[in-house]
Image: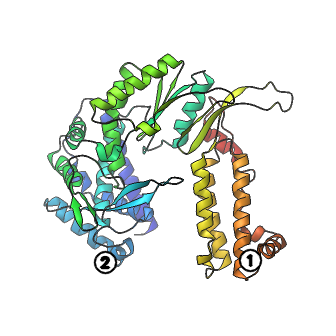
Amino acid sequence: MSARRAMTTEDKVQELQRTLYRAAKAEPGRRFHALYDKVLRRDVMERAWEQVRRNGGAAGIDRITISAVEEYGIDRLLDELSSDLQEERYRPLPARRVFIPKPGTQEKRPLSIPAVRDRIVQGALKLVIEPVFEADFSPVSFGFRPKKAAHDALQVLLDESFRSNRWVVESDIANCFEAIPHDRLMSAVEERICDRKVLKLIRALLRAGVMEGTTVRHAVTGTPQGGVISPLLCNVYLNRLDREWETAPCGRLVRYADDLVVMCASRRQAEQALQRLTAILGDFGLEPKAAKTRIVHLEEEGEGFDFLGFEHRLVRSKNRGGGKPFVFLARWPSRRAKQHARDRIRALTARSRLLVPLEVVVQDVNAFLRGWAGYFRIGNSTRTFDKISRFAVDRICIFIGKLHRRGTRYGWAVFRSSPIRLGLINLHGFVVAPRPNMAWRALVAEHRR
C-alpha cells in the first residue's frame, strides 16, 4: 500500500471512529445494533493490518509470521478474512501461551500470542467498538486508552499530594486478565452493543482458548493477556468498578488497567477506601493481590510506593537561588526499573555478541536507552540517569576489551579517544521535572524549545 493510500485509509477510519464516539456520547443509553458491517470494511481491515505489522510480535500456534503473511499477500489474506467473517465461517485459533519474566523478580507473566490473522480480526473489531465504550469510560481510568498516557495518571498523584492527600492505598487486581468472568464481561459489553454478529465474534475470541505445550485449555474466565482486544475488554469490565466507586468515593481513585492507587486525606479514609475497594472487587468476582496491597503514609524521609514503574516519595526541595523550600511528591525509576535497564544493557553487550560489529552494539544500546529514558525522563530522575549512563559506558568499554582480547582499561582508552563517545548517547540533561497542577505535555514541549 502506498503512503498516500495508507493516509487516506487512516483518515477514513478516524472519521468512522469520531462518528461512533459522538453518537455514543450523545446517547448514553443507546445500544448499537449495526456494527458488524463496519468491522468488515476494507479500510478498517487495512488499518488493523497496519497496526499489527507495526507492532510486530511472534507467530501464533500456526507458526505463520508477519513476514510470511507479506509473502502470501496482504490483499489476499484480507479478502479471505473478510469472506470468512461475512459468511460467519471465521473461527479463531487458540493463542500460544508463553511465560515471560517480570523485570526485577523471579515471577513470570503468562502471555498469550494469537495468530497474525486473529490479531488482524481483533484489531478491526477494536477499531470499531472502542469509540462506543470510550464515550462511557471514567476519567479515573488511564490505561490503554486513546489520548491517555501513564504520565496523565502520574500527574494526578502529584496534584493530589500537593493538596495534602498523602495517605495512599496501593494495590493491583490479582490475575485480572485471567479472572474476569466471561458471562459478566459479556453483560457489560451488551450494555452498549446488541449487534448479534459482533457479540458472537467477541464470544468466539474469548472461547478460543490457549495452547500450553500440546494442550489446549478453554476457560470460562479471562481475556488472555497479549490479545489485541484484551486491554479494551478489561477496561469495559473494570469500568463498572470505576462507576461504582464514583457513587461514594473514599479518596481519589487512579486506575491504570489492573493497577490501582487511591489518594486519601487521612488514615481513616484510607482504611475505608481499602475496605470498599475490596468489597467492590469481590462483587465483580475479583480480588486485590495481597502481596501488593497496603496503605502508605507519605511523609518526609518516610516510606514511598511504586506505581507505573516509578518510585514515589515525599521530599523537600533544595534551597537554591534563595527560594523557599517546599515539600513535593518526587518520582524516579523504581528499583525494578533500574534493574531491568542494567540487565538489558548487560545482555546487549554480552560476550555472546562479540561477532556483532561494535557500531551495531552501540546502536542497540542507544535504541534501548532512548525508549527507557523517553518514559522515565518525566520525573526527578537525574541521578538515576547519570548512573545508568555510566553503566552503559562501563559495559561498552568491557565489550571493547573483550573484542580485542585485552582488558577493560584498553576499552576505556578507545572510548575516551573518540570525540563522539563512539556514538553512545548521554542521558545528561534529558530529564523534565514535573510540577503540581501543570500539564506535563506542556513542560515537555517547553523543554524541547
Q: Quadrant of residue 325?
A: top right
Position of 18 relative to 92 (above/below): above
Image quarter in which the N terminus is found = bottom left
Q: Quadrant of residue 239?
A: top left
Q: CA distance from mark 2 to mark 1?
A: 45 Å
Q: Quadrant of residue 282?
A: top left
Which of pointers 2 and 1 indicates the residue nearer the eye? 1
Is 318 in front, or is 367? 318
Q: Locate residue 409 relative to residue 353 in the image: left or right.
A: right
Is 231 in front, or is 440? 231
Is 94 in front, or is 247? 94
- Which residue occupies 19% across, 49% down? 203
The x, y position of residue 187, in whole percent, is: 21, 37
The 10 Å Cα crowd at callout 2, few under 14, some 14 to 19, many 20 or more, is few
The x, y position of residue 442, in whole percent, is: 63, 39
Label 1: which residue? 401
Label 2: which residue? 72
Is any part of residue 434 visible from this angle?
Answer: yes
